[in-house]
Image (cartoon, grey):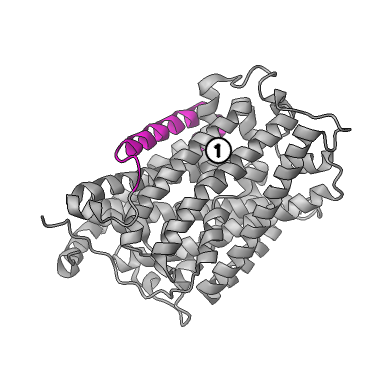
Amino acid sequence: MKEQSLYLEKENLKKDLKNRHIQLIAIGGVIGVALFMGSAQASKMAGPALTLAYALGGIVMYFVLRALGEVAVEHPVASSFAGYARAFCGPLVSFITGWTYWYQWVVLAMCEISAVGMYMKYWAPDIQQWIPALICLAVILAINLVSVKYYGEFEFWFALIKVVTIIAMLFVGFAMILFGFGNGGVAIGFSNLWINGGFMPFGWTGVSMALVMVVFAYSGVELIGITAGEAADPEASLKSAIDKVFWRVLVFYVGSMVAILSIFPYEMLPKGVSPFVMIFEKAGIPYAASIINIVIISSAASCLNSGMYVCGRMLYGLALRNEAPAFLGKLSANQVPANGILVSSGICLIGVYLNYASPDSVFYYMSAITTTGCMWTWSLIMYIQLKWRRSLSNEAIANLKYPMPCYPYANYAVGAFMLAVTLGMGYDHDNLVGLYVAPVWYGGLFLLYKLFKIGEAQQKADLSIQTEW
């Protein structure tokens, strides 16, 4: 049986990302300020059932990664699912996906520089929020323009700071819960998970609303697939990173939520204050707020670092597929897509301006917009894997290097999860902005596609250079 043909653009990126880089990029890309500062807001929606929301989101995230991994191990390219979309869904979906993922990360980058601006005010309350945001953006831009090796190295250490902090919080938190550390020797126990209105005080509606923050927190984990294009050993690196990131994320996110919501009733968690600070202060650790502020800022810088990396590679792939201006497909002397990185950084200046014009609400609005982009990406990954598997013969399926488990039921379950998240966004005023912006964005891309006849040009390009597997 003749397998479905797939054209993937020829890339000239440097293969400089080692396994240790990809391991930490995988976990670092998904641990951002949402864990350190967003959990208090999310707990107001779901109560202790926020732990359930993170667990459900973690399972969905795992299947999304396994679906992406199944295809990426066979065909590792930096454009990842945007490139696969063209083969299985056509040039229109490829165009929309590539630009949407770029937009998702640009908006996420705006969130992260906003977090830097917000938390720098702890030490310099009189400083205008946009100033540290701009400085952080400039530093991360410089790192990404030098070499992919330096991006990987900086991300490794940024992510390590986050991981060490979370592990320390888990040890301190569970010492309080089980042995009364920092509480006069009286064990706090787990009763706060159910005595204040029950485990699900707001029912499934609350869980659905909290899923919006959960998806935002986990957004970026699909970055693993994009690193395949610059991995020294993509098959081994991807398999190892995907297998480990699921358990690490569950331990870090679900474990953190269990510890926080056991120690403090969810009503006591104030918006804008990190629960990590509250736990360390309760334990009597000196300079707790300063320590966590440093971690949050490094966490935001880490996600911004990943954002610049992704945006440059996504614009590079779009240009190679004739879906973006040709100058974005050119590499610097260091084999870095510098033009794409510079353009993306320029767009991020909008985030710097918003920190000047609307410093109090910019983070929450940007997070809702990021979530809608993530929902498109995750849904598309599951659809691509579904079509990919259906295109294969029985012999090819038997020889897959990294097949996704629970196919096709996992694909349908992820679709149902995305519907629940959409409904949750409709219940929360702060998240409605994401639903308002989404149709404008997708409608605008569709009009651009038709106006410039991108599809016609792309179909001709596919016919001229398409190859068989």
Front-lying residue, 447 or 193: 193
Question: 286 left or right of 143?
Answer: right
Q: In which quarter of the image is residue 28?
A: bottom right
Q: In which quarter of the image is residue 203?
A: top right
The stretch in magenta equals: 404-433
- Image coords of residue 5 (percent x, y): 18, 60
The residue at the point 51 percent across, 22 percent down is 204
Residue at the limit of the structure toward the left, as seen here: 1
Q: Can residue 469 be seen in this view?
A: yes
Which residue was labeled with disc 1? 213
Image position of 130 with respect to 269: above or below: below
Q: Could you tell me what secondary structure mostly forms the magenta stretch?
A: helix
Question: 211 left or right of 302?
Answer: left
Front-lying residue, 253 or 292: 253
Question: 134 left or right of 108?
Answer: right
Image position of 234 with respect to 384: above or below: below
Front-lying residue, 272 or 394: 394
Image position of 267 with respect to 434: above or below: above
Quick one: label 1, few (<14), some, or many (20+) residues within 10 Å?
Answer: many
- Image coords of residue 411 (percent x, y): 33, 39
The residue at the point 34 percent across, 51 percent down is 445
Position of the C terminus by quadrant: bottom left
Q: Does the magenta stretch include residue 240?
A: no
Front-lying residue, 115 or 255: 255
Q: How many marks?
A: 1
Position of the N terminus by quadrant: bottom left
Tag 1, which secondary structure? helix
- Image coords of residue 400 (percent x, y): 28, 55
Q: Can residue 431 be seen in this view?
A: no
The residue type indicated by label 1 comes to Met
The residue at the point 65 percent across, 53 percent down is 163
- Image coords of residue 363 (percent x, y): 61, 45
